[in-house]
Amino acid sequence: MERLIPPTLSLKGRLRVPGDKSVTHRGLMLGALAQGESRLHYPLKAGDTLSTAAVMRALGAEITEQGEHFHIKGAGLRLQEPTDILDCGNAGTLIRLVSGLLSGQEFFSVLTGDASLRRRPMGRVTKPLLAMGARIEGRDRGNLAPLAIRGGGLTGIHYELPIASAQVKSAVLLAGLFADDDTEVVEPAPTRDHTERLFRHYGLPIEVEGRTVRTRRASPFGARDLTVPGDISSAAFFIVAALITPESEVLLEGVGLNPTRTGLLGVLKEMGADLTWEVTEGQDGEPVGWIRARSSALRGISVDPRQIPLMVDEVPALAAAAAWAEGETHIPGLEELRVKESDRVAAIAQNLQRLGVGVEAGPDWLRIQGGRVQAGVVEPFHDHRIAMAFAVCGLPVGVRVQEAEWASISFPSFWEDLERLSNPA
Ligand code: S3P
């Protein structure tokens, strides 16, 4: 489905973005492992997280949607052998984290997903899980789904992550809940720490010392309610939309402001953004607050590559901001973007070209010549964040977005919210 965005004069209003995708995936998994009943409040109900709910149901948890929350009846630490293949859809976080969980289960399971997910590298999780004692087979020597797992009999490991990846860290920590001996993961750079915070919320073993995270075999644990903060990765599109559209002001409320997720805010400030935010409460271990963005005269900068793991999903939105900035923006450290829902380095470069923006792409970098954006047609390459980032990039001049339905993977109300806040020419 193609979506036509008319040239937009200004963007104004307040918005509560949908629940955080990373926290919703984890909340569903840990609620399913708990004993007893709990509520997951304000979860993200979108393509990716509905896949997680379906997978956890197939593993024995009872999960029902009730108004604004999911009601979860946990299966306990011993899940149920699924009677069929588990379909992870488009969700990388689901297939990688659940691989860790299934490695701890003494039964057979098979994980698959859509065409995009079946192209994404799984060796990064199967390698440490095999080292812990799980039996895992997959295409391309265990690097590609479908993955067949027979778990159980795990021993803890000390694992130095070769890449900064919260998904790999979390998969190993989840497996560690079922292992003899301690499991230790060392990160090369900080990544989102929702798993660590949620382990604390549920009273599961977790110790953090600098870049080392440690866990060990869990005892049966009780269910606890959890409130999911708004997703800063979804807020990012409205932040950038307000910055690049004249006479705009947007207030985003109830947004998760976990410091391992807020890299984009600092980078935009460095570009001259009129952007303020404040943490107003701690919600089940996660800082939550508001963000206000106003139209700004942005300038190009050279982004510090150490910021990328703290804004890994926001690079498409940053590219949209860079297209409107005066001068050149250099974004290094993008090797991981090549293996997201699409090859995002290529997808960003091609769509910037479609809007008349000068861009050069290297193996792990982008150089964007900002200041001149033309109306055009953009192609999301089956990637939700590319669809939303380029809808925003074309907003002030008008843009046609192909495959607009992909936004529903993480932000089902994106198009309606955009229309509600926009004042078309
Ligand atoms: C996620 C971690 C990141 C991110 C993804 C969600 C998570 O992936 O891109 O959207 O919830 O742990 P990597 O761990 O592959 O960087």
Image (tube, grey):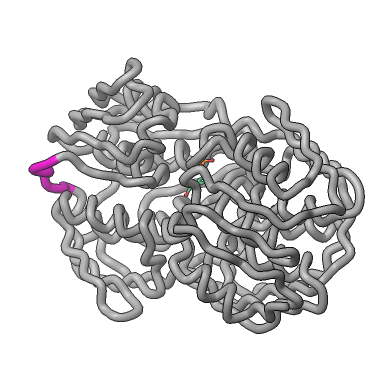
**In the picture provided, is 38 more to the left or to the right than 332?**
left
**In the picture provided, is 300 more to the left or to the right than 144?**
right
Q: How many marks?
A: 0
Q: In the picture shown, does residue 52 fall above or below 338?
A: below
In x, y percent, where is residue 151?
A: 21, 31
In x, y percent, where is residue 57?
A: 18, 56
**Residue at (16, 47) in percent of width and height:** 78
**In the picture provided, is 67 more to the left or to the right than 250?**
left
Residue 163 drawn in magenta: no
- What's the magenta region? 78-84
Quadrant, the C terminus: bottom right
Q: In the current view of this chain or complex, which residue is farthest to the left?
A: 83
Q: In the current view of this chain or complex, which residue is farthest to the bottom?
A: 13
Query: Which one is nearer the viewer's eye here, 376 or 174?
Result: 376
Query: Which one is nearer the viewer's eye here, 307 or 396?
Result: 396
Quadrant, the N terminus: bottom left
**Residue at (21, 65) in percent of width and height:** 63
Q: In the picture shown, does residue 346 fall above or below 325?
A: above
**Residue at (73, 40) in percent of width and height:** 306
Residue 80 drawn in magenta: yes
**In the picture provided, is 112 more to the left or to the right than 344?**
left
Residue 293 in which image quadrant: bottom right
Q: In the picture shown, does residue 1 fall above or below 122?
A: below
Residue 115 in which image quadrant: top left
Query: Which one is nearer the viewer's eye here, 381 or 17?
Result: 381
User: Does the image show residue 375?
Assistant: yes
User: Does the image show residue 267?
Assistant: no
**Majority secondary structure of the magenta segment?**
loop
In x, y percent, where is residue 217?
A: 30, 42
**Residue at (81, 73) in percent of width and height:** 246
